[in-house]
Amino acid sequence: MKAILSSQARSIMIVGGADTGKTSLIEALADLLSSDNRTGILDLDMGQSHIGPPTTLGWGVVSKGFKGWERIKTAGLYFTGATSPPGNLLPSLAGARLLLDRALQRCDKVVIDTTGLISEPLGRVYKQYKIDLLSPDIVIGIERTDELGHILDAYRYQRRPKVFRVPVSQLAIQKTIIRRTDWRAQKYREYFEDVKELRIDSSSVGLRFTRDIEEYGLEGRLVSFRDNVQRDLALGYITDTGLVKGRISVRTPLKKGAAYTTVIIGRAKVEF
C-alpha cells in the first residue's frame, strides 16, 4: 500500500486473466487514490470497455472517490478497430501510449486496466511489450496459481516497474461468452442511440484502415473520425460505400461542425 500511495508511483498497471477481478481492484484503487490525488483511469480493454464504446481505448478522471463508471466522463479515446488484441496489436499499443501521455499531463495518478489476454505465447509478448512501452511505476498481477509467471518473472530484478502479485478474490465473477457479447451490444446501442447519416467524400479526408484494405464487405464496419492532433472525436458505422466513386455513408453521433481530418476504418462490425 505504501508503494501505491507514494508520490513516485504515478502509473499503476493491473494485469490478470479474464474474470480475475481486475475491474473491482481498479474501482477500489481509484476510490482510494482520488481522495487526495487527481486520478485517472486508463481503460485498455477494447472488448469490455467501461470508458468509451467497444473497439476503443479510453480514459477519464475520477474525482473524490469512485462513484460508478457511468459518472466518469470520457476525456479521450483511441480507436483500435477491433474488440480484441489478436490481429490488432499495433493499434492497441500505439493508442495506449498516446492516451497515457495525455492522462499523465492532467493527473497525479493513473490506474491502467488491461485485457485478459495472458496466454502463451501471444499474451506474454503482448503484455511484456505493453509494460515496456507504458513503463508503469507499479504492476499488480492478479492470479489464481502462477499463470502470470511467464509474464512477470522477467521483471523480478529490474528497478522498474515494482511488481506485486496478489491472489484472485473469491468474489470474482465468471462471465460467459454470451454475457460478454451482450455487454458489447448494449454499449453499442447506448453509443449509437442518437445518430445521423453522414456522407463522406473520400477525396477530402485522409483515409486509413486499421488492418486490411478492401472495397467489399465494408458495410457495418466501424469507423472513427480523427482530428489533426490524433484525437478520436466519435465513432460511426458504414451503411453504404462506393470507394471507387469516392464516397462513404456513415451513421454517427459526431457533433455537427466537428473538424475531422481523417477517417479510420476498423476491422470490427457494429454488433446490435
Image (cartoon, rainbow, N blue to C red):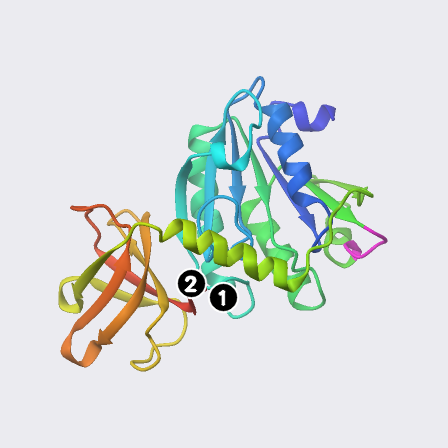
Residue 244 colored magenta? no
Residue 108 lies left or right of residue 157; in this view the side is: left
Locate residue 99: give its quadrant: top left
Tell me which secondary structure the magenta stretch mostly adopts.
loop
The residue identified by callout 2 is 81
Q: Is residue 121 left or right of residue 95?
A: right
Residue 88 numbered tag: 1
Q: Is residue 138 visible?
A: no
Disc 1 residue type? Asn
- Which residues lie in the magenta part? 144-149
Residue at 48% over, 62% down: 90
> Closest to the observer: 111 or 218?
218
Quadrant housing the N terminus? top right
Q: Quadrant of the C terminus?
A: bottom left
Q: To which quarter of the image does residue 249 belong? A: bottom left
Measured from the top left, where is residue 52 in percent x and y? Answer: 44, 47
Q: Is residue 240 above or below residue 44?
A: below
Q: Nearest the camera: 43 or 188?
A: 188
The residue carrying pointer 1 sits among few (fewer than 14), some (14 to 19) or many (20 or more) residues within 10 Å by Cα, namely: some
Which residue does the image show at 24% across and 74% down from the upper left? Answer: 241
Q: Amino acid at mark 2?
A: Gly
| Nearest to viewer (mark 2 / mark 1) | 2
x then y, percent, for residue 10? 57, 31
Q: Which mark is residue 230?
A: none
